[in-house]
């Protein structure tokens, strides 16, 4: 539907989005390791670290040598694996554009916890919807969906540059493309479209992000851009109120 390019939304509470950058680096490194290694290694990583609902609910078991971490850890590890470059690039672009301001609103540590909880929520809903699936779920989409929904609640009126239909750049309020994107996820989930995409994981992340940001944001950070939040240590000096000069002829302009 749209590709986010840039937002004019400066950081207010942190100097740099260390966690956002760290998550992007981690995802890229893991993708490089799995892409430029043997096919057997990539498959072993997907099976051993991907989220497989049927193994989580004891309906199936991984084969000998396929268990890299305990099943419960795959609620998180799956979110650092990606299939092809476009899968990785799309998720990381969304994280780069929207993640810094959510990290700013939550703080570094709470943002990392928030991100992982959204990933967990995405995997959980995917598993509930398709409990018998033996196909590994991979990708950061659930976590990214949580970041996007949190951004919507925090900064709906901020102008963002988006690329529409891969060719038309537009600068519009953030709520327009994000609401359309969220609606698209629900429509595709209801229509069971594109089996290779876990729409349930997206929705799980969206719901988790919207709920968590309400409770995890910094004290004083508003929702829906209601107020202008002044960074700590900054002082705002208001100019004295202007007074209209009174002419000698009186306040009504007549003698």
Image (spheres, rainbow, N blue to C red):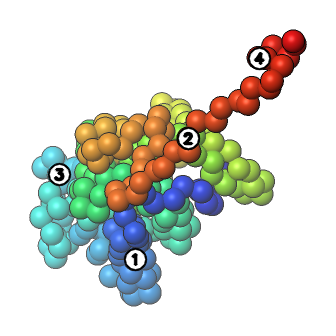
Q: Residue at x 60, y 57 (%)?
A: 8
- What distance separates the C-alpha of mark 2 from that of mark 3? 65 Å
Q: Earlier in the sequence, mark 2 or mark 3?
A: 3
Where residue 40 sits: x, y (%)? 34, 81
Q: Earlier in the sequence, mark 2 or mark 4?
A: 2
Q: Which residue is mark 3?
A: 56
Where residue 23 sits: x, y (%)? 36, 69
In the picture, the disc for residue 240 is: 2
Q: Residue at x 46, y 38 (%)?
A: 227
Where residue 203 sits: x, y (%)? 40, 40
Where residue 38 sits: x, y (%)? 39, 87
Q: Earlier in the sequence, mark 4 or mark 1?
A: 1
- What distance separates the C-alpha of mark 4 from that of mark 1? 67 Å
Secondary element at image label 1: helix
Q: Which tag is nearer the camera, tag 2 or tag 3?
A: 2
- What distance separates the C-alpha of mark 2 from that of mark 4? 22 Å
Secondary element at image label 4: loop
Tell me: 165 left or right of 19. Answer: right
- What distance separates the C-alpha of mark 1 from that of mark 3? 28 Å
Tell me if residue 138 comes above or below residue 176 in the rendering: below
In the picture, the disc for residue 25 is: 1
Q: Which tag is nearer the camera, tag 4 or tag 1?
A: 4
Which corner quadrant holds the C terminus? top right
The residue lying toward the viewer, choosing from 245 and 240, is: 245
Q: Which tag is nearer the camera, tag 1 or tag 2?
A: 2
In the picture, the disc for residue 101 is: none
The answer to whether mark 2 and mark 3 are in CB contact below 8 A is no
The residue lying toward the viewer, choosing from 211 and 232, is: 232
């Amino acid at each position: 539907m749209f590709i986010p390019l840039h937002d004019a939304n400066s950081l207010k509470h942190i100097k740099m989005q260390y966690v956002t950058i760290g998550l992007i680096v981690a995802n890229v490194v893991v993708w490089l390791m799995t892409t430029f290694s043997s096919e057997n290694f990539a498959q072993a990583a997907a099976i051993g670290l991907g989220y497989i609902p049927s193994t989580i609910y004891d309906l199936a078991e991984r084969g000998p040598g396929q268990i890299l971490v305990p099943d419960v850890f795959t609620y998180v590890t799956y979110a650092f694996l990606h299939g092809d470059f476009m899968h990785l690039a799309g998720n990381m672009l969304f994280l780069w554009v929207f993640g810094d301001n959510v990290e700013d609103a939550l703080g570094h540590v709470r943002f990392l916890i928030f991100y992982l909880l959204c990933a967990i929520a995405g995997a959980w809903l995917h598993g509930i919807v398709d409990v018998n699936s033996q196909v590994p779920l991979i990708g950061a989409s659930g976590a990214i969906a949580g970041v996007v929904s949190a951004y919507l609640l925090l900064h709906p009126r901020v102008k963002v540059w988006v690329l529409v239909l891969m060719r038309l750049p537009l600068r519009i309020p953030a709520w327009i493309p994000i609401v359309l994107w969220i609606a698209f996820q629900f429509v595709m989930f209801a229509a069971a479209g594109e089996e290779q995409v876990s729409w349930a994981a997206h929705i799980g992340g969206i719901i988790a992000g919207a709920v968590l940001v309400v409770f995890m944001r910094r004290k004083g950070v508003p929702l829906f851009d209601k107020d202008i939040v002044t960074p700590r240590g900054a002082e705002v000096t208001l100019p004295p109120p202007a007074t209209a000069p009174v002419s000698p002829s009186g306040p009504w302009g007549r003698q």
